[in-house]
Image (cartoon, grey):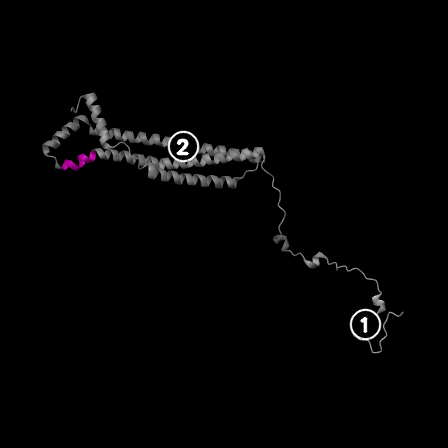
Amino acid sequence: MDPKPHIRRPPSYSDSLLYLPELSQAPLVPYRPLQVQEPLLSPKTDIDEFTQPRPPIPSRTFTVAETWYNRLLGFAFHITLISIFETIFFFQFVSQTEDKGLQKMVEGYINGILTSCDTWSSNTTLFVNDVLTDLINATAVYQQNQQAVQNRHSENDALQVKAWLYVIGLASVTGVTIVLGHQASLRFAWKRILVDNALMVTLLGIYEFLFFKTIIYNYQNLSLPELNEYVVNQLQQTCALLGQ
């Protein structure tokens, strides 16, 4: 039996399969996709070296010795910066403020006399002058003042020098520690330590200044009436003066 149907008209394209026995009987070959090399699909360029993520580089953690070395240097830097701040703050601000406070206290005693002495009569002025001359030697007061000023300045200057020697000593210990650690090949996180301690001391200095200005400076010490009562009691008990 002939598998081809017999037709009398010329074959058309739709009947082509009926007249292609070689192709219709050819064995089927499984489809295999075209293998394309990777560089043809995504060629690498020089910019890929910067845009593509790189695997993280493992960092060596601090050893026990390096950890304590950094802690020690952190404490040393902190104390050194604190000593610098305290020395400047005390001698340039606190000491001068205390001197002004004592001067204001003395002014509170003499302001009453200074504001009323112009209204005194001549007899009252002579009487008060005789009493004060017997109690106070003005020439001796001037001489004692000059000597006291020199002694106070020399002692305070010695204290300030001692304070700066403390600063130099702490800075020297810190420097020696850095040198020894460098010779021992110990890693030092100097950026973090410097920045952390500088910020901490700066904030601490601002807080101390504000605390002194708003709290300590406004603290109410003994008032003049309280001091007057103390003087009167001492004169009454010791010298039997100003009897009630």
Which amino acid type is shown beneath numbered disc 2?
Answer: Ala
Where does the C terminus fall, quadrant-wise?
top left
Q: Secondary structure at mark 2?
A: helix
Q: Which residue is mark 2?
A: 163
Q: Nearer the viewer, residue 178 or 209?
A: 209
- The answer to whether 81 appears left or right of 35 in the picture is left
Quick one: which residue is furthest to the bottom in this view? 9
Image spot of residue 118 (x, y percent):
14, 37
Please identify the quarter of the rendering in which residue 120 is found: top left
Quick one: which residue is furthest to the right in this view? 1
Image spot of residue 69 (x, y percent):
54, 34
**Is residue 168 covered in magenta?**
no
Please identify the quarter of the rendering in which residue 216 is found: top left
- The answer to whether 119 appears left or right of 175 in the picture is left
Image spot of residue 218 (x, y percent):
30, 37
Q: Give whichever of discs 1 and 2 has the lower sequence position.
A: 1
Q: Secondary structure at mark 1?
A: helix
Please identify the quarter of the rendering in which residue 157 is found: top left
Image spot of residue 242 (x, y percent):
16, 25
Which amino acid type is shown beneath numbered disc 1?
Answer: Ser
**Is residue 115 covered in magenta?**
yes
Where does the N terminus fall, quadrant-wise?
bottom right
Disc sitting over residue 16 in the figure: 1
Label 1 – label 2 distance at C-alpha: 112 Å
Q: Which residues are magenta?
A: 110-118
